[in-house]
Image: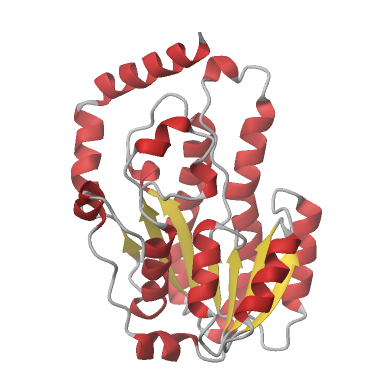
Amino acid sequence: MYNYRLLEKLLFLPFPRLNEKRLEAACRHKTVLITGASSGIGEKLAFKLGYLPVHLILVARREDKLLAMKRDIERSSARVSVYRADLRNAGEREGLLSMIHRLPDGIDIVVSNAGLSINRSIMDSLDRNHDFTRTMAINYFAPVELLLSLIPLLKRTQSHIINISTINTSLAPLPGWAAYQASKTAFDTWLRSASPELHGAGIATTSIYFPLVRTPMIEPTAAYSQMPAMSPEHAADIIAKSMYARRRTWMPWWLPSGQLVSVLFRGALERAAARKLRGRGR
């Protein structure tokens, strides 16, 4: 288990107590799709569910890593299918959906975990419109297209959609994060808007608002190396628990206070973030 420092223990609290029997009952003989499965949260979740009698569909760009995971996980109880896809690519999304629609038993649980983070000043982005198109492609358009296609299958099996979101969608936006925050907020809003209709159709939804998680996605941002961060193992436990608890939302205990602080001190936070970006550009 990840060894948290004192501050991290205070921020993230102990690992949730998983009820293994309830988790197995919620997942037994079901098909679980995990996007972004080859590293970080998706990888840890796949191995955690691998001890259950489930069918895992693991999707990511690195086929070699997915095949290695398949070999390791299938030594336990789960059956694993892998699909190499860059979900920013419309053709590869279409291929994934074609594969899923050919499954004889449909699909039961969708964990929308794939994502892309970019921290860059607007002034450094003037000739980088692709930063915005690619973040929208993976963080918004991909999960929307997947779910629009899969909702008829999910209705047949009374299933569950789990969105791996971020606390950033609940906080005042800061300089440097325009591409990331806009794209993550777009899908968060889409799912919250669609949820009442989905619930009416018998499809449960859960939005999980994680703080910083120590995954490969945060490595390009040097400032994150010393900041408190949740472990991917901890994040995977929370997702696993949501599969049987089916709470509509999960967020850190301190996020409501963080929302208030981000509004009250927005000006100071914006100035500090802008100074840091200017300093980075010198």
Q: Is residue 82 left or right of residue 19?
A: right
Vertical side of 211 occupied by 44: above or below = below
For the point 41% across and 36% down, the residue is 224
Q: Is residue 124 above or below residue 227?
A: above
Instruction: Choose between 253 and 227: the one closer to the eye.
Output: 227
Which quarter of the figure has residue 227?
top left
Q: Residue at x 49, y 60 (%)?
A: 41
- Judge whether residue 235 can be spotted in this image: yes
Question: Dividing the picture into quarters, in which one does residue 77 lie?
Answer: bottom right
Image quadrant assignment for residue 101: bottom right
Question: Where is residue 129 drawn, in percent x and y?
Answer: 67, 26
Residue 240 higher or lower than 120, as above or below: below
* Residue 277 as seen in the image, left or right of residue 171: right
Q: Where in the figure is residue 14, as x and y percent of width and height? A: 24, 64
Q: Is residue 193 visible?
A: no
Of 3 and 44, nearer the camera is: 3
Q: Nearer the viewer, residue 162 or 237?
A: 237
Q: Give x and y (percent) for residue 233.
A: 41, 64
**Residue at (58, 48) in percent of width and height:** 140
Query: With 195 as the anchor, is 67 left or right in this view?
Result: right
Say above or below: 39 vs 104: above
Q: Is residue 224 left or right of residue 250?
A: right
Colour mapping used in the image: secondary structure
Residue occupying image coordinates x 45% and y 12%: 278
Marks counted in the figure total 0
Quadrant including the N terminus: bottom left
Where does the image place residue 156, in percent across and percent down from the top left?
Answer: 59, 85
